[in-house]
Image (cartoon, rainbow, N blue to C red):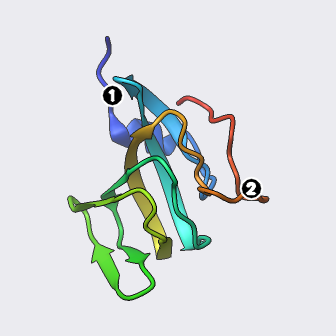
Amino acid sequence: MEKITLSQKFAAFDSYWDPKIVGDLNGQHVKVAKLKGDFIWHHHENEDELFWVVKGQLKLEFRDHSVTLGPGEMMIVPRMVEHRPVADEEVHVVLFEPASTRNTGQFVNERTKDDLDRV
């Protein structure tokens, strides 16, 4: 058991779209990530995904609408809902999702991160 200081965790890396594990909770990973630019359209077949914005503005695009989240705001994207995160400027997010969740959902491509580092 140890205290987790998010600012220290975010300072430990510079890469975008490269989630890092900061903790484990009942089969869930607690992750931090820096986002910038557009991600891919994807969905998760079996997992809900929680996005909690710590810094910046994150737009979550859905096929029929979009939602913009600012610091202190979060959204849970239910399984099977196609979405695309977009960050015009650098965004820091905390993610809560099952340990089995692949960041690119049903796709495997150059942005897929299967073996996540811990910070």
Q: Position of residue 104 (x, y in %)?
A: 62, 57
In the picture as drawn, the residue positioned furthest to the top comes out as 1
Vertical placement of residue 23 versus 46, above or below: above
Task: Say left or right for 43 vs 91.
Answer: right
Q: Identify the mark at residue 4; answer none if there is no mark.
A: 1
| Nearer the observer, 27 or 73 | 27
Task: Say left or right for 82 vs 2.
Answer: right
Task: Say left or right for 66 vs 87.
Answer: left
Residue at 70% across, 52% down: 112
| Nearer the observer, 54 or 21 | 21
Residue at 64% across, 57% down: 106
Residue at 45% across, 44% down: 32
In the picture as drawn, the residue positioned furthest to the right comes out as 110
Q: What SS does tag 1 mark?
A: loop
Amino acid of disc 1: Ile
Q: Position of residue 9 (x, y in %)?
A: 45, 37
Vertical placement of residue 94 versus 77, above or below: above
Q: Position of residue 77 (x, y in %)?
A: 35, 61
Q: Say which of marks 1 and 2 sits in front.
A: 2
Q: Which residue is mark 2?
A: 108
Task: Say left or right for 115 vs 67.
Answer: right
Amino acid of disc 2: Val
